[in-house]
Image: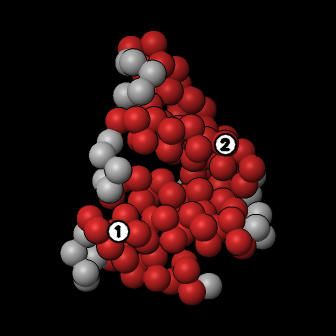
Amino acid sequence: MGDYSKALEFYEKSLQIREKALPSNHPDLASSYNNIGQVYNNMGDYSKALEFYEKAHKIKEKALPPNHPSLGISYNNIGQAYDNMDDYSKALEFYEKSHQIYEKALPPNHPHLVISYNNIGQ
């Protein structure tokens, strides 16, 4: 609906509860960080989005196997933030990391691969 401040308020409340109730490397915390990052991305605050995407990614790296598709999504989000900040070489680096995971973890006709090819080709 475009009410980013309201979305941020509720995602931050969710994060506060999860930080109290869960261990610091729990995947649900990564989900909260990612959601907050998405809101900042939608608001055009790409450096703040990147900060939260990186927090989410650090948790996922500890909690998931190295070729888990969720790590691919995480790399893609980080790449998107760099892309939005016009740092295209850094964006490409993360898009390629994402693509490598998708190629190993997903079937060849999976939609994430389509997005991955598109992001690399931009």
Q: Residue at the location (54% across, 78% down)? A: 119
Colouring of the image: secondary structure
**Residue 114, percent across and down?**
39, 81
Figure check: 72 above or below 56: below
Figure check: 92 above or below 33: below
Tell me the number on the disc at residue 51: 2
Q: Name which of mark 2 and mark 1 comes first in the sequence.
A: 2
- Name the mark nearer the viewer: 2 or 1: 1
Residue named by callout 1: 102
Q: Residue at the location (37% across, 64% down)? A: 101
Please state which of residues 54 and 49 is positioned toward the viewer in this rendering: 54
Which image quadrant is residue 72 in? bottom left
Give left or right: position of 33 versus 29.
right
Figure check: 28 above or below 78: above
Q: Which residue reaches farthest left? A: 107
Q: Which residue reaches farthest top? A: 20
Q: What amino acid does circle 2 point to?
A: Glu
**Residue 117, percent across and down?**
46, 82
Is residue 2 shown to the viewer in this render? no
Q: What amino acid does circle 1 point to?
A: Tyr
Q: What is the secondary structure assignment of the residue under circle 1?
A: helix
